[in-house]
Amino acid sequence: MKHFLAIADLSTAEFNQVLSTAKKLKAEWRKRGNKPILKNKTLGMVFQKPSLRTRVSFDMAMLQLGGQALYLSPNEIGLGQRESVGDVARVLSRFVDGIMARVFAHAHVTELAQYSRVPVINGLSDHEHPCQALADVLTIVEWRGKLKGLKVVFLGDGNNVARSLMFACALGGAHFVCASPQGYALDDASVAQARALAKKSGGSVELLVDPKAAARAADVLYADTWTSMGQEAEAAERAKVFPPYQVNAALVALAKPNAIVLHCLPAHRGVEITDEVMDGPQSAIFDQAENRMHAQKAIVAILMGGQARRVKKA
Ligand code: CP
Ligand code: NVA
């Protein structure tokens, strides 16, 4: 693994390795804190969009591993505007040991990776949110003991978060279902690619329109905003078609009694998810948010700290 731009960049072995490293680092952090395996290493963080979780969890992950993170706000770099994406990568990668970027166009993270001398991590693009999907899987395994064989249901827009979750489920042998209104489903090419992976792992990928049919006997129900960052002009139009996909008590009642509820956050309470569900006993949402830090520690440890070799030997 050289960069981490999309879940499907990982082989099954790498996917499992990231998860086991995350678990190990989380346990170590809980016991006596992490060892400074990233001493003197710096992660440059380029943001074209706002963030709470991504910014703070990467910052803390680097700090707790003995390194540091540098926050570069949307106004500073002007990715592709003040300076070409390639030149930003060429220059920034002379100063730092890793680059994390949150961008609009996915092509911008692939271009950064193309011209960077150091590993590039996708901290959300219009196509994928792979760090989120790792935290999602870590949470599912903590709450339900496994991923393989579970029915994981995403409700709403076939967006970046849904796509990364689909690929993670396909690698991990889960049965992924995405229920979206007509016109908002995941794209055919991604679905075909995920189905090919699922075939090997014993998982499956299904697209539905009916949210109730999707939620029936689910092990995991997943909500995200109906209007992602960058789509604000479509918010009113989207608000008309998405209400049947709200994750509320009636929908949760259709899932298995031990089903868990996830949301990548930020949530619009009372819109795509109700307070009752978010604050209820089946909500794993705040563990999921914490797990961003643990999952990303594994990513930076492997990409920037040579943990791959160490893990292999252990
Ligand atoms: N889930 C997530 O990526 O949150 P932020 O947008 O706050 O980083
Ligand atoms: N789909 C959302 C996720 C936010 C973390 C967005 O892209 O805005």
Image (tube, rainbow, N blue to C red):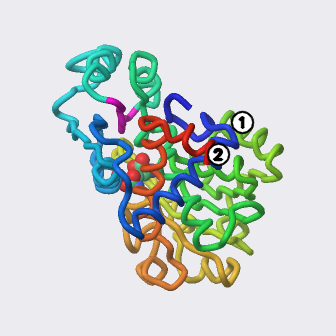
Determine contact: label 1, label 2, CB under 8 Å: yes
**Kind of residue indicated by mark 2:** Phe
- Image location (x, y in percent) of residue 234: 40, 47
**Kind of residue indicated by mark 1:** Gln
SS at circle 2: helix
- Image location (x, y in percent) of residue 243: 50, 67
Q: Quadrant of the N terminus?
A: top right
Q: Residue at x 56, y 68 (%)?
A: 244
Q: Is residue 272 above or below residue 9?
A: below
- Image location (x, y in percent) of residue 193: 71, 36
Q: Report the magenta stretch's main SS.
A: strand
Q: Is residue 235 visible?
A: no
Q: Residue at x 28, y 19 (%)?
A: 94
Question: Disc 1 marks which residue?
Answer: 193
Q: Tag 1: Cα neighbours inside 10 Å, few (<14), some, or many (≥20)?
A: few
Pick whichever of labels 1 and 2 is earlier in the sequence: 2
Question: Disc 2 marks which residue?
Answer: 167
Q: Give the residues in magenta.
A: 97-104
Query: Does the Cβ of the disc 2 residue fall within 8 Å of ligand 2?
Result: no
